[in-house]
Image (tube, rainbow, N blue to C red):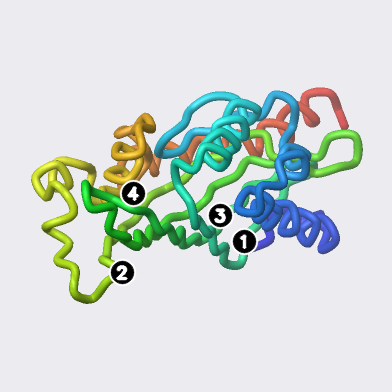
């Protein structure tokens, strides 16, 4: 969706290309990934909250340390709302992950459905991400070996104790010694409604400022 009377189709396509640049994360192209973010950009997802620089460093450490291998983020068509030099982007995402768990190191596939929600600004003529968060919907875990019973690989009670919208992802993060942000935003929650409200307010802030200065 394109919002605002002066939304440029070129701007919208540039923003969509920016969001799809997240593919650099799966490929381990860290400098290209960093170029997507403004210097003061922040990130808040299931396993990290802080600067985009810190997020990229965490991804790089996990990638090079072999904590989690075989991760693929499949991004859908970004829905873009532009207002002047700011934009909001809402994108459906499927996260595919293959990891070895348990004492027998059996392979499991984890599939997570979520949305990536970005705050984007045009700075010095270039669109950059200033904040990114995720809204988690549901996930599942499956044994790769059809002869393997999943309950023999994982602690089912621990799994049940985790937030249902991303419990399989959270379980894998825990098993690979990563911090779990259990207050991550989930779909249809008060936190999601507050996020969307604050995002809309952020989008129109610049219009208020421009009108106050007679622009």
Tag on residue 169?
Answer: 4
The answer to whether residue 81 is visible is no
Quadrant where the image shows the C terminus: top right
**Residue 143, relative to residue 82: is it above or below?**
below
Q: CA distance from mark 1 to mark 4?
A: 23 Å
Q: Earlier in the sequence, mark 1 or mark 4?
A: 1
Q: Quadrant of residue 58?
A: top right
- Check disc 3 and report the residue beneath it: 90
Q: Which residue reaches farthest left? A: 157
Image point 47% across, 54% down: which residue?
115
Badge 1 density bin: few <14, some 14–19, many ≥20, Cα 10 Å:
many
Residue placed at 27% from the left, 58% from the top? 106
Q: How far apart in space, not on screen, are marks 3 and 4 (Cα)?
A: 21 Å
Marks 2/1: CA distance? 31 Å
Residue at screen point 57% across, 32% down: 55
| Tag nearer the camera, 2 or 1 | 2
Q: Is residue 3 above or below residue 170?
A: below
What's the mark number on residue 128?
A: none
Q: Nearer the viewer, mark 3 or mark 4?
A: 4
Contact? badges 3 and 1 (CB < 8 Å):
yes
Number of other residues with Cα within 10 Å of mark 2, as a class: few under 14, some 14 to 19, many 20 or more = some
Q: Is the Cβ of the residue at disc 3 closer than 8 Å to that at disc 4?
A: no
């Amino acid at each position: 969706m394109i919002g605002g009377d002066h939304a440029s189709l070129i701007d919208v396509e540039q923003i969509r290309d920016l969001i799809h640049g997240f593919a650099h994360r799966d490929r381990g192209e860290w400098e290209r990934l960093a170029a997507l973010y403004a210097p003061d950009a922040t990130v808040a997802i299931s396993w990290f909250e802080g600067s985009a620089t810190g997020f990229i460093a965490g991804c790089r450490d996990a990638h090079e340390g072999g904590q989690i291998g075989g991760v693929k983020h499949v991004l859908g068509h970004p829905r873009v709302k532009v207002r002047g030099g700011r934009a909001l982007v809402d994108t459906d995402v499927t996260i595919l992950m293959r990891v070895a768990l348990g004492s027998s190191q059996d392979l499991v596939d984890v599939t997570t459905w979520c949305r990536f929600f970005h705050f984007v600004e045009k700075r010095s003529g270039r669109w950059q991400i200033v904040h990114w968060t995720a809204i988690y919907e549901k996930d599942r875990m499956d044994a790769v070996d059809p002869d393997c019973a999943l309950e023999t690989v994982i602690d089912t009670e621990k799994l049940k104790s985790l937030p249902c919208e991303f419990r399989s992802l959270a379980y894998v993060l825990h098993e690979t010694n990563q911090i779990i942000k259990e207050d991550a935003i989930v779909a249809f929650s008060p936190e999601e409604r507050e996020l969307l409200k604050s995002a809309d307010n952020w989008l129109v802030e610049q219009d208020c400022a421009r009108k106050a200065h007679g622009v």
